[in-house]
Every structure is written in C-alpha cells, then in structure tokens.
Amino acid sequence: MAKYLNNSILKIVLLLTNEFYSQNYLLSLTRLVDECPKHNIKLILSKGIGSNLTEKRNNALQGKTERGIHQPVLGIDYDYILVTSPSIQFHIEQLLELIKADKDIIGYVPKLNNNLFDCVMKGENELLKTDIRLMNNLIEVDYIGLHFCLIKKKVFCMLKYPWFQISKFETVKDNVEIVDYYSEDMSFSVLLKSIGISIWVNPKFIINTTTLNLF
C-alpha cells in the first residue's frame, strides 16, 4: 500500500469515548498503532469523558463550554478525526482506503441484527435494505453510523461548538404533533447536511461487530 502525502506525516486523531472496549477492538487498535508509522501516519489517541456520548466526543476534541461556540478543535495540528464504536474489528487497509477516497467524511457500516445496513441512502428515510457489498462505487448517503468514520479537519472548522450534539425534530404520530430526538450519529449527519457537507460510505469493507466484553 502506497504512502500518502508525498512522504509527509498524516496526523489522524482517534477519539476514545467509551469506558469499555471489546477484545477484538483492542487487538485491532494495537495492530493499527503498529502499522500506522509504516505508512507515514501519526495516530494520536484522544480520550473523552462525560455523562453521554456527545459530551464524551466533544471532550475528546478538547472542547470546553466556557470557551464559547467559536473555539479551536484539539489545539494541535491534525488532518483527520477518526470516530469508531467500541465493539468493532478493523485493520490498516480499511483506514488507508478511506484516506485514498479523499472525502470530507467517509466510513464503513456494519450489517445490523435486523439485516439492515447502518446508513440511509440519499432521498430515502429508512436504513439501507440492499446488501451494500453488491455496490462497487463510493455511495453518497444522508446518514451514516459512526462505526469507523474518517472526518477531515475542514469539517470541524466549519462547525460551531458543540461539534457533536443531539438534534430534535417535529413529527406527527396518530394525528398528534410531537417533538422527538435524533440519535447521536443521526444528529451529526443532519448537522453536516445543513452546512453542505456530503457524506460517503465505502462498500468495499463491512465493519464486523463483536460482543462487548468488559476490559
């Protein structure tokens, strides 16, 4: 696999936002840390704590409420943010494929227990039912679950703090108008779409999830 950026160092910050990780995740991370320098990638681990996932992600990016809505992300030089979920398996080739795609935000998705894939195609309002592995090219979507997702620095430069947040929406159920809330990942996709960021899925790999054991 070719090295990137003409032998300059590519800096990727991996957000660690869970207290517990599966054994396969920890093994994957160990291998990734070992492989990244071979491809001129500096992998930076950033831990976030908090009472919910959005707070943990914002804290991992070194965000502080008292600094206001206009504040720098992390306070260090970086090229990408890598967001993962704690029970997945992954390897260096998957990361390199996402870098090569050169998209503002791109990731892989798992097949869920209900045989749906954790993304929503453009113009649709339901999770993908068709086997994504049958698709050959990168897919532009309206929503992607942040299971293994690479996000360019420029995206966060376009956002105000809090960069991750919960969004609400109005709907009608049984002829009653109600207010409901998107999930953390759906909220992020909605936010990016609102500022004109295209979201992409690479169908080449399917993210494998495993039982989350406590470590």
Image (cartoon, rainbow, N blue to C red):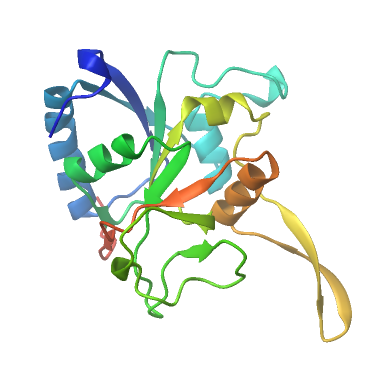
146 sits left or right of 185 in the view: left
For the question of whether residue 58 can be seen, the reply is yes
* Figure quadrant of residue 191: top right
The residue positioned 47% from the left and 31% from the top of the image is 60
What is the total number of numbered labels drawn onto the structure image? 0
Residue at image location 48% in from the left, 36% down from the top: 104
Q: Is residue 27 left or right of residue 181?
A: left
Residue visible at 18% across and 40% down? 92
Instruction: In the displayed orientation, state which residue is furthest to the front.
Output: 137
Q: Is residue 3 left or right of residue 114?
A: left
Residue 137, percent from left and from top: 35, 56
Instruction: Determine the image quadrant of residue 182.
Output: bottom right
Work out which residue is located at the far right of the displayed protein and give it: 176
70 vs 137, nearest the viewer: 137
The percent position of residue 155, horizontal first and vertical second, equals 55, 31
Residue 189: % across, % down: 58, 50
Say if residue 165 shows up in the picture: no
Image vertical order of residue 28 relative to residue 159, above or below = below
Quadrant holding the N terminus: top left
To which quarter of the image does residue 168 belong? bottom right
Q: In this view, does 104 lie to the left or right of 196?
A: left
- Residue 171 versus residue 38 in the image, above or below: below
Q: Which residue is drawn at 63% across and 27% down?
A: 158
**Image location of residue 145, percent across then percent down:** 46, 56
